[in-house]
Image (tube, rainbow, N blue to C red):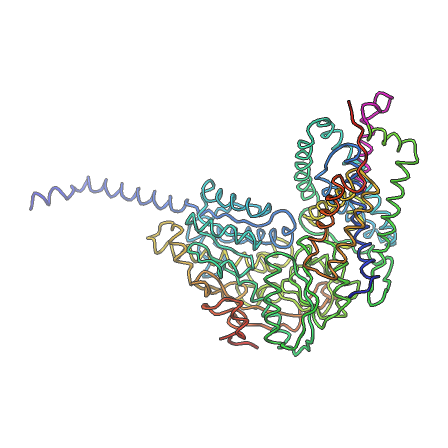
C-alpha cells in the first residue's frame, strides 16, 4: 500500500495539468456551444511555440527563469494569432448550424492543424527541459518530486481562480454569462455577441496552449502530442458538466485521484478507472455534476 | 523436301530485312525491359506519435536506398541497377489512422497503384490486420518493423514475410545480458504500453526471468496507455517499491517523456533500467539520457551494429542524406529492401528475365538468407517467412568530448541464442528453458 500522500500528490499533479486544458474546452463549449475536437491541436501549438520561444531565450544565454515568461508568451501568441484567425475565418460561418456539423468542422481543423505544425516545425522532436529543473526537487517520504510539478499545481489553481473571478466578478464576465444564457437576449441588449464569441474562443485556446506550453519541458514535443490529452479532457468536462468551471475542477480532481489510485493499486485498471468515474457520475447526473440549468425557450 | 526447303529459307535480300526487323524487335524489347519499373508501396508512419521515432527515419532510409539502387551504387551483391535492371518506383503511404484504414490503403496499393510489392508497417496491430488481407489477395507483402510474434505464430501465410526478428529476441536478450554480466537480480519491475507490443514484451521478459533468475520476484507491472505523455504516477509507483531492475519496452515520444520525467526524480539511480527498444532516443536526448541504462535496439543496429563494409556504406549513405546516424527503424527498412532486391533478382532470373509475380517473389524469398548492415538475415522461422538475426545489448554513457551518447559493455547474441527454433512458439520455447539455444555468451 503506497503512502496516501503519494496517491494524493500524484492525483493532484495529474489533475492540475488536466484542469488547465479542460477549462479551455469547457469555456469554449459554454459560450460557443462547440465541442472542439481541435482543442488538442492548440495544446500542441502551445507546446511547439514554447519550444521555439524557450529555445530562443536559451540561445541568447538568458537566465533559465526567463523561460517561464517565454512559455507564457508562447501561449499568448497562439491565442492572439491563431484563435481569432480560426474563429473569424471559419467557425463564425457555422454558428447556429447543427452541432454535429461543428464537430466535423473542428475535426477537420484538427487534421489540418496537425499538418500545419508538421509544416512549420517538422517531425523531429524539440526538447525544452531547461525550465524543468528550475524549482529543484522536493522529497516526500520515499518519493522525490520535481518542484516544477508542484508549480504546475499552483498555476492550475491560479488559472482557475482568475477565470472564475473574471467571469463572476467583472462586467465583461457578466456579459459573457449573459451570452451563455441567451445570445439573442444579450444581443438585443446591445452586447456585441460576435466579439464575445471571439474573445471567449481565444481565452479557451489560450488555456489549451498554456497547458501545452507548461507541459513542453516534461516531454519531447513532436507530432502526436495533441491526441491523448483531448480524450481525457473530454472525459473531465463531461463528468463536470459541459460549460462549468467548477465542474472542470471537480472532474479533473476526480479523474486525477481515480487514476492515481488505480495506477498504485491496480495498474491494469488505469484507463478503465477514468471511464468508471464517468459512468458512475452520468448514472446519477446525466448532464454532469455541475450542468447549468437551461432556460426553456418558448 | 527440296520444295519445302525453299519455302522455309529466304533469299539473301529478304533474309537481311528479316534479320534487321528481328534486331529492331530485340532492341525494342531490350529498351522496354530497361524502361520497366518495379513499383513498391512503402508504408510507415509519416504523422502521429510513431512518425519521428520510426516512420520517418525508416522512410528516409528507404529513399536513400532506392536512390542508391537506381544509380547502381550499392556494393556487391546489391550492385545491379534498380532491381535487376528494373528501375524502382516507390510510393510512400502514411500508416497513421488505425488498422481499418490500413487495410483499405493496402487494397489501394495493390489494386489502384498496381504496386508489385508492399514493404511496411511499424504497428503490431496494423501487421496483424493487413497480413490476412495480403494473403487473401495473394499479393506479396513484407512486414519490416512490427514486433509481435503472433503474426506468424498464430497464422500461416504464403505471401507474407517479416524480414526482422520479432520482440521475443529483444526481451530474451535483455534477460541474458543480466546473466552474462553477472548482475544480481532479486526483484524486477516493469512498465510497458497497454497494447499488443507492450503486452507481448512484458510477457516474454517475465517468462525469461522465470527461467534465468528463478528466485527474482516480479513487483510493479505498470501498463500506461499508448501516448500517455504523463508518467508521474507510474514513476511514483516504481519508486515506492524499487526493484533491482526495471524493464520497459516503451518507445518513441512515450519513452522520451518517461526518461525526461523519471531521470530528474532519480528513478534511474535507484534501479537498473532496461529498455528493449531504446536506441532511437539517444541522438535526441543527448546528455539527458541517464548513464548506465541497459538498452537494446531490436537488432544489432546503430551504435551496436557490427563492423562490415556493407554497414560502413549504409551508415554513410544514410548519414549523408539525413545529417544523423541511422538507428533501428532505418536498419530494419534496409534489411527488408536488400532482401527484396535479391528476391526480385532471383525470381526474375527464374522467370526467364521477365518481371516476377507475387507467387514467384514469395518462392524466391522463402527460406532465403542475405547480408545486411546488421549482419546475416535468415528466413528461418514460420516455414521460411519469419527472419532471425543476431542482436546486441549495451550500456549508455554520455561522452562529453563527442557530445553524444555512446554504448559500452556491448554483448552480442547469436540469432540461435535469442530466437526460438523453427518448430516452437516463442512462449513455449522460453518456458522450456530455451531448448536448443546455441552460442549464448
Q: Is residue B419 left or right of residue B188?
A: left
Q: Is residue A189 magenta?
A: yes
Q: Is residue B284 above or below residue A38?
A: below
Q: Which residues are magenta?
A: A182-207
Q: Position of residue B1 (x, y in %)?
A: 6, 46
Q: Position of residue B14 (x, y in %)?
A: 19, 39
Q: Is residue A173 left or right of residue B127?
A: right
Q: Quadrant of residue B173?
A: bottom right
Q: Is residue B96 above or below residue A138?
A: above
Magenta span main SS: helix
Q: Is residue A220 magenta?
A: no
Q: Is residue B224 left or right of residue A244?
A: left
Q: Position of residue B99 (x, y in %)?
A: 56, 48
Q: Nearer the viewer, residue B366 or B371?
A: B366
Q: Is residue B57 above or below residue B414?
A: above
Residue furthest front as drawn: A284
Q: Quadrant of residue A285?
A: top right
Amino acid at each position: 500500500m503506497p503512502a496516501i500522500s503519494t496517491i494524493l500528490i500524484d492525483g493532484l499533479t495529474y489533475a492540475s495539468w488536466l484542469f488547465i486544458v479542460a477549462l479551455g474546452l469547457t469555456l469554449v463549449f459554454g459560450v460557443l456551444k462547440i465541442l472542439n475536437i481541435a482543442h488538442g491541436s492548440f495544446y500542441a501549438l502551445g507546446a511547439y511555440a514554447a519550444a521555439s520561444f524557450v529555445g530562443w531565450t536559451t540561445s541568447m544565454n538568458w537566465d533559465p527563469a526567463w523561460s517561464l515568461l517565454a512559455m507564457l508568451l508562447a501561449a499568448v501568441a497562439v491565442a492572439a494569432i491563431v484563435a481569432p484567425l480560426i474563429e473569424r475565418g471559419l467557425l463564425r460561418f457555422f454558428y447556429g448550424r447543427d452541432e454535429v456539423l461543428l464537430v466535423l468542422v473542428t475535426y477537420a481543423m484538427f487534421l489540418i492543424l496537425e499538418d500545419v505544425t508538421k509544416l512549420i516545425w517538422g517531425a523531429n522532436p524539440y526538447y525544452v527541459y531547461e525550465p524543468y529543473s528550475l524549482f529543484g526537487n522536493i522529497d516526500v517520504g520515499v518519493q522525490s518530486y520535481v518542484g516544477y510539478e508542484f508549480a504546475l499545481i499552483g498555476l492550475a489553481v491560479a488559472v482557475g481562480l482568475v477565470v472564475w473571478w473574471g467571469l463572476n466578478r467583472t462586467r465583461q464576465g457578466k456579459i459573457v454569462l449573459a451570452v451563455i444564457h441567451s445570445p439573442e437576449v444579450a444581443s438585443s441588449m446591445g452586447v456585441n455577441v460576435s466579439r464575445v464569441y471571439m474573445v471567449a474562443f481565444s481565452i479557451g485556446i489560450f488555456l489549451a496552449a498554456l497547458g501545452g506550453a507548461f507541459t513542453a519541458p516534461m516531454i519531447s514535443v513532436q507530432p502526436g502530442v495533441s491526441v491523448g490529452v483531448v480524450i481525457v479532457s473530454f472525459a473531465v468536462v463531461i463528468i463536470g458538466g459541459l460549460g462549468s468551471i467548477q465542474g472542470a475542477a471537480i472532474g479533473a480532481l476526480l479523474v486525477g485521484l481515480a487514476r492515481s489510485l488505480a495506477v498504485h493499486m491496480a495498474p491494469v485498471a488505469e484507463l478503465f478507472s477514468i471511464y468508471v468515474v464517468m459512468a458512475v457520475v452520468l448514472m446519477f447526473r446525466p448532464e454532469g455534476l455541475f450542468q447549468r440549468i437551461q432556460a426553456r425557450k418558448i | 523436301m527440296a520444295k519445302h526447303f525453299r519455302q522455309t529459307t529466304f533469299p539473301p535480300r529478304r533474309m537481311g530485312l528479316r534479320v534487321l526487323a528481328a534486331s529492331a524487335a530485340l532492341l525494342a524489347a531490350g529498351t522496354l525491359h530497361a524502361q520497366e519499373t518495379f513499383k513498391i508501396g512503402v508504408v510507415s508512419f509519416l504523422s502521429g506519435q510513431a512518425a519521428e521515432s520510426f516512420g520517418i527515419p525508416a522512410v528516409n532510409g528507404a529513399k536513400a536506398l532506392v536512390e542508391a539502387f537506381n544509380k547502381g551504387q550499392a556494393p556487391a551483391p546489391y550492385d545491379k541497377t534498380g532491381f535487376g535492371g528494373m528501375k524502382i518506383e516507390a510510393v510512400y503511404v502514411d500508416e497513421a489512422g488505425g488498422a481499418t484504414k490500413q487495410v483499405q490503403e493496402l487494397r489501394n496499393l495493390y489494386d489502384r497503384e498496381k504496386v508489385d510489392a508492399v514493404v511496411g508497417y511499424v504497428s503490431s496491430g496494423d501487421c496483424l490486420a493487413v497480413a490476412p488481407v495480403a494473403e487473401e489477395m495473394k499479393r506479396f507483402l513484407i512486414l519490416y518493423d512490427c514486433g509481435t510474434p503472433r503474426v506468424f505464430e498464430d497464422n500461416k501465410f504464403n505471401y507474407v514475410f517479416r524480414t526482422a526478428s520479432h520482440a521475443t529476441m529483444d526481451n530474451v536478450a535483455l534477460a541474458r545480458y543480466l546473466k552474462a554480466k553477472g548482475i544480481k537480480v532479486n526483484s524486477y519491475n516493469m512498465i510497458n504500453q497497454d497494447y499488443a507490443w507492450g503486452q507481448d514484451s512484458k510477457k516474454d521478459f517475465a517468462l525469461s526471468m522465470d527461467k534465468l533468475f528463478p528466485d527474482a520476484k516480479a513487483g510493479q507491472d505498470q501498463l500506461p496507455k499508448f501516448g500517455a505523455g504523463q508518467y508521474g504516477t507510474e514513476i511514483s509507483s516504481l519508486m515506492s517499491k524499487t526493484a533491482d531492475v526495471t524493464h520497459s519496452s516503451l518507445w518513441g515520444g512515450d519513452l522520451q517523456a518517461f526518461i525526461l520525467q523519471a531521470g530528474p526524480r532519480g528513478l534511474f539511480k535507484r534501479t537498473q533500467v532496461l529498455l528493449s527498444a531504446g536506441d532511437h532516443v539517444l541522438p535526441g536526448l543527448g546528455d539527458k539520457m541517464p548513464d548506465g541504462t541497459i538498452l537494446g535496439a531490436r537488432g544489432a543496429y546503430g551504435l551496436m551494429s557490427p563492423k562490415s563494409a556493407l554497414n560502413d556504406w549504409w551508415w554513410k549513405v544514410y548519414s549523408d542524406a539525413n545529417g544523423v546516424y541511422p538507428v533501428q527503424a532505418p536498419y530494419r527498412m534496409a534489411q527488408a529492401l536488400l532482401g527484396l532486391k535479391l528476391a526480385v533478382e532471383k525470381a526474375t532470373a527464374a522467370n526467364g528475365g521477365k518481371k516476377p509475380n507475387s507467387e514467384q517473389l514469395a518462392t524466391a524469398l522463402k527460406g532465403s538468407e542475405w547480408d545486411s548492415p546488421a549482419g546475416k538475415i535468415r528466413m528461418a522461422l514460420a516455414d521460411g517467412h519469419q527472419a532471425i538475426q543476431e542482436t546486441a545489448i549495451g550500456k549508455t554513457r554520455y561522452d562529453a568530448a563527442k557530445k553524444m551518447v555512446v554504448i559500452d559493455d556491448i554483448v552480442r547474441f547469436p540469432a540461435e541464442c535469442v530466437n526460438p527454433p523453427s518448430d516452437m512458439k516463442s512462449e513455449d520455447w522460453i518456458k522450456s528453458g530455451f531448448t536448443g539455444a546455441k552460442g549464448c555468451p
